[in-house]
Structure formats: C-alpha cells, structure tokens
Amino acid sequence: MFAALIILPLIGAGVTWLIPFDRMRPKALALFACGHMGLVIRMLIHTPPESPGGWFHLDALGKVVLLSTSTIFLACAVYSMGYLYYRRERSNRLLCMWLLICLSAASLVTITHHLGLMWVALETTTISMAPLIYFNRNARSIEATWKYLLICSVGVALALIGLYFLAYATVVAKVEPSLLLDDLVRAAGKLSSGWVHAAFVFLLVGFGTKMGLAPLHTWKPDAYGEAPGLVGALLSGGLVNLAFLALVRVYQLCIATKEITFFQNALVVMGLFSMILAAIFMARQADFKRMLAYSSVEHVGIMAVALGLGGTAIFGALFHLLANSLTKGVLFLSSGNIHRSYNSKSTDHVRGAMRRLPWSGGLFLAGFLAITGSPPFAPFISEFTIISSSFIQGRMAVGAVFLISLSIIFIGMALTVLPMVMGEAPPNSETTSYRETIGTVGPPLALMLLVLMLGVWIPAPLMNLLREAAAQLEVR
C-alpha cells in the first residue's frame, strides 16, 4: 500500500502528460486526487505494517501531515477544473503533470523514516513546484521562480550537510552508520555531542528555510504573489507542513539525545521573530497575495513556537498545522477568483469584492476572520491552546509577545481585507469575463465548512490521532 501511495500520482502524471486536450487534463487531475484521498483514508483506518528494514512506516505524525496534504491537494485539483477554464490562453499540461509529481513526493515525505530519503523527497517537491510558480510566464514570475529555487535549494543543501554530520556522529560513536530515524534514536546516547549539535543547527536552518521561518522566508512573498491561487494554496497549506514534519523528526531525535532544550529555545526565538516580522510587513500591504505570504510566515512561526514550548502546546501545533492548511486553502483559492475577476492583485484596484463576487468575497472575509484566530473557527482553538500553554509554563514573555503580534496582525490584515471585500468598487475598475461557478466556489466553500466544523467539534478519530501524534513528542 505504501507503493500505491507513491505510484498512483506518478501514473496520473504520465496520463495527464499524454492527454492531448487541455480541458480533459484537470478532470484527470481531480480523478487521481480522489484516488489518492481514497488510499489515504484506507491507510488511516487500516494502517499497513512497517516495511522490512524500517524505511517506510506511517506513524501518527505522518498520518496528520498526510491527511492535511491530501485534503488540500484534492480541493485544489477540483478547483483547477473551474480555474483553468478561464486560463485557456496557456497550456496546462506541465501544471497538471508537476502537481501530481509533487503529490507523489509529498506522500513519500510522510511515510519514510529514512532521513536521507526524506531529504530527497523534500527536494523533489521543491523542484516540482518551480514550473508551477512560473505558470504566468512573465518577468515577475520568472524572478519569483529563481528566487524560490535558489533560496530553498540552498536551505535544503544545508539540511543535507546536517544529515552528513548526523551520519558522521554515528561513525565517531562506533555504531552502525545509519540515517534511519529509529536506529538513530536507539543509538542516541552514544552519539558524539559536538557533531549532533552541529547537525541540529544545520537541519534547523535548512528545513526552516523550506518552511519559511524568518529570516529565511525571503522567497515567500514573491513565490506566493506570482503563483496561481491553487499553487499558493499548496505552497502554504501543503509544502509548509512537509518541512514542519522534517523539523519534527529532528525534534524526536533531540528528545532521544537529551539535547532538546537547545533546539526548543531556537524554535521559540525563530518562531517569535517570524511573527514579529509578519506583523510589521503585513500592515498596509498593497498586494493581497503578498499579504497572504506574510500570513504564512506568521503561522509557521506559531507552529515553531508551539513546538519549542512543548507540553500541551504540541497538541496545539499539530492541530494548527491542520487548521492553517485548510484556512490557507480558503484564502488562496478565493483570492485566485478575485484576482481573475479584477485582473489585479493591487488593493488600489480591488474594492467591493462582495458586490462583484458575493461567494468569493464572503469566503475571503471568513478566511480572514479564521486565520486571525477569531472564534468559532479552528485556528482559534489551536492558538488558544498554545497561548494558554505558554502562560501555564510560566513563559510570560513568550505569551505576551505572541498575543501582541496576533493583535497587530489582526489590525494590519483588517485594514487591507475589509476595504477589499466591503468597500466600493473604483470607477476605473477593469471588467473581465470571469464569473463565479460551482467549480471555483465549491472547493473553498467546502474547506471553509471544515474550518468551521473543527472550531466547534473535533471528531473523536481525529482527536485520538492528534493526541497520539502529540504523545510521540513528549519529553520524558
């Protein structure tokens, strides 16, 4: 079943490449996304046993990330059928093919316990997203693509050096060299402390770059701003979670080596810095897609702070991973509709979206309320859990900076979002042929309903899964 999870999207990539008609490829993309989701649900209910040698194993942490990744991908695949109808001036062959290749690599990240193979899969997701960022084929999109490739590749290369240091630590300790997580955890007490510390630094910087933690976030505003809405949703709601899972694997090793305090403190500092920087740059942002990019910087910071705090904040981090993924899907897909209708991302031209696009404008407003931690939406639950954990632990300064940053971000986003959706359309606003359809409104609406549902009721199986995953990260 592990093989099916990887091979099915690759078969889909081949099929979409061979289909000669642009209108048929998004349907094939959605079909294979549904098949992938079916496999994921089956694996969540009937988890396959660990593979021989321990290279492949779907634990609770992997299940949470796999579920969020497949969900957001399915929503984007269904959305693509309506969205690409309005982008008939461009061939969608490469877009559909690379989306499915990315899904295959993302699935591999969640099921492998070999850190080297996980690194290869993460690098594959980086490469596969580059042609998607360049979809609009203009000067700004190619600049964003090169910046994304350069910065993320450097980050992933630093992570590779960290893996080399880990492997050398096993050589120095005279234990069997291995990059299997379980082997490293068992040998943790014998590993060279100096080499392990060096490895943790490089892994934090490397995977932190891929995740978009400040000050390693500089690729995000350009990539998110120039990519199509569905690609932005996958970057913010999918690939970020994969990088976070990689950091979580490092965190598990830190627990085993008893070097967890150093790693936790680094996570808290980088997380708070990300939130502060996002608060500064989000205010009065003239490009609403770049505003969403800084919102992503904020929320990876929230997850990093929660992981660094430990305790009950771990549950908050994992729930926030899921809540943020779904909410970012709402925001990026609805913003894609607004962009198509106004043919502009500038807040100077986009006004009164709820008058022109009642569904998309309303969903963008609801997504703004959810992503800023307003009740009764899911991010409120996760953020409240993290904040309360910081005060319970006596980390008053952390909790205070966290709350102040959230408040500033709420005000900054409101100053941009409210005029966009509720103001009056400017008289010189461009009129386009775009009209809302069930294909472009249905996926973000479904995601918004999930965000609302999880804010008032978490199904028992999901609650048990989150608790099991959090238990794997308990410091003993």
Image (cartoon, rainbow, N blue to C red):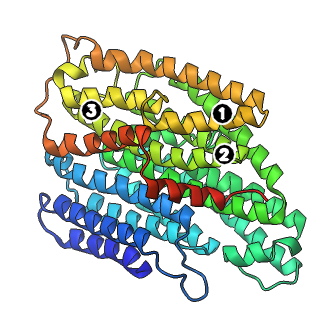
Distance between mark 1 and mark 3 Cα atoms: 38 Å
Q: How much space separates mark 2 and mark 1, taking CA atoms?
A: 9 Å
Q: Amino acid at mark 3?
A: His
Find residue 388 and name its label: 1
Badge 1 amino acid: Ser
Give the residue number, with chain letter if any, for mark 2.
312
Q: The residue tagged with tag 3: helix, strand or loop?
A: helix
| Sequence-first disc among 1 and 3 | 3
Which labelled disc corresponds to residue 161?
none
Query: Whole-percent x and y of residue 374?
Result: 46, 27
Identify the image quadrant of the N terminus: bottom left
Residue 385 vertical position relative to residue 356 in the rendered view, above or below: below
Q: Quadrant of residue 201?
A: bottom right
Which residue does the numbered mark 3 point to in the structure image? 339
Q: Is residue 359 left or right of residue 9?
A: left
Residue at (32% x, 30% y) in the render: 364
The disc, 2 or 3, on the residue closer to the chain's N-terminal end is: 2
Q: Residue at x 43, y 38 (%)?
A: 455
Q: Secondary structure at mark 1?
A: helix
Disc 3: CA contacts within 10 A as few (<14), some (14-19) or many (>=20): some
Q: Secondary structure at mark 2?
A: loop
Q: Position of residue 131 (x, y in %)?
A: 37, 56
Nearer the camera: disc 2 or disc 3? 2
User: Residue pushed farthest front?
Assistant: 460
